[in-house]
């Protein structure tokens, strides 16, 4: 017996040995079948990303203009605070 055969027999007897991929039971699949399934799942996720009104807008684009301004102001305030903190640390 070669080492490869011994390792395979040990894995069959004790499924806790080996890698995680060795323990996953999956049916054989061709490359074309895998691509077809990938394309189906990516098409399904794209259709879920489209909003209720049928447009593909981001969350920020759907906000009220006042809330956009608040979000922008908070972001700029946070960036300014971080930069001042870094300058303070270099100055200390």
Image: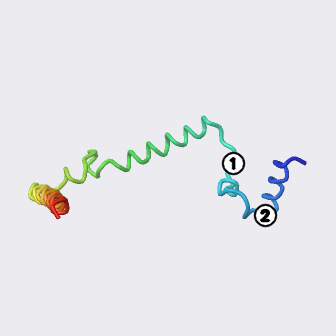
Distance Cα–Cα, label 1 vs label 2? 21 Å
Query: In this orientation, does residue 10 appear?
Result: yes
Q: Residue 25's quadrant in the figure?
A: bottom right
Q: Please rate how many residues cluster around mark 1, counting C-alpha atoms within 10 Å: few if below 14, some from 14 to 19, many from 20.
A: few
Seen from this angle, which residue lies furthest front? 92
User: Marks 2 and 1: in contact by CB < 8 Å?
Assistant: no
Relative to 18, is 41 on the left or the right?
Answer: left
Count of all numbered marks drawn on residues in the image: 2
Mark in the foreground, 1 or 2: 2
Q: Which of 23 and 27 is in front in this view?
A: 23
* Residue 55 in the figure: left or right of residue 81: right
Mark number, residue 14: 2
Res 29 quadrant in image = top right
Q: Can residue 74 be seen in this view?
A: no
Q: Which of marks 1 and 2 is nearer the N terminus?
A: 2
Instruction: Give the residue drawn at x 71%, y 57%.
Output: 18
**Outermost top residue:** 32
Q: In this view, does 34 lie above or below 13?
A: above
Q: Is mark 2 on a helix, strand or loop?
A: loop
Residue 53 position, x and y percent, is: 25, 49
Mark 1 element type: loop
Tell me residue 6's x, y (percent).
85, 53
- 2 on left or right of 56: right
Image: 5 above or below 33: below
The answer to whether residue 4 is above or below residue 79 is above
Label of residue 27 in the image: 1
Q: In which quarter of the image is the C terminus?
A: bottom left
- In front here: 40 or 10? 10
Quarter where residue 19 is shown: bottom right
Residue, x 90% and y 48% (percent of image)? 1
Image coords of residue 45 (percent x, y): 42, 48
């Amino acid at each position: 017996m070669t080492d490869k055969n011994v390792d395979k027999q040990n894995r069959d007897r004790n499924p806790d040995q080996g890698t995680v991929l060795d323990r996953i039971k999956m049916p054989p699949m061709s490359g074309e079948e895998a691509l077809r399934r990938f394309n189906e799942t990516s098409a399904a996720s794209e259709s879920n990303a489209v909003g209720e009104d049928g447009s593909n807008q981001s969350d920020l684009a759907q906000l009220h203009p006042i809330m956009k301004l608040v979000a922008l102001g908070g972001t700029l305030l946070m960036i300014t605070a971080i930069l001042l903190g870094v300058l303070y640390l270099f100055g200390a």
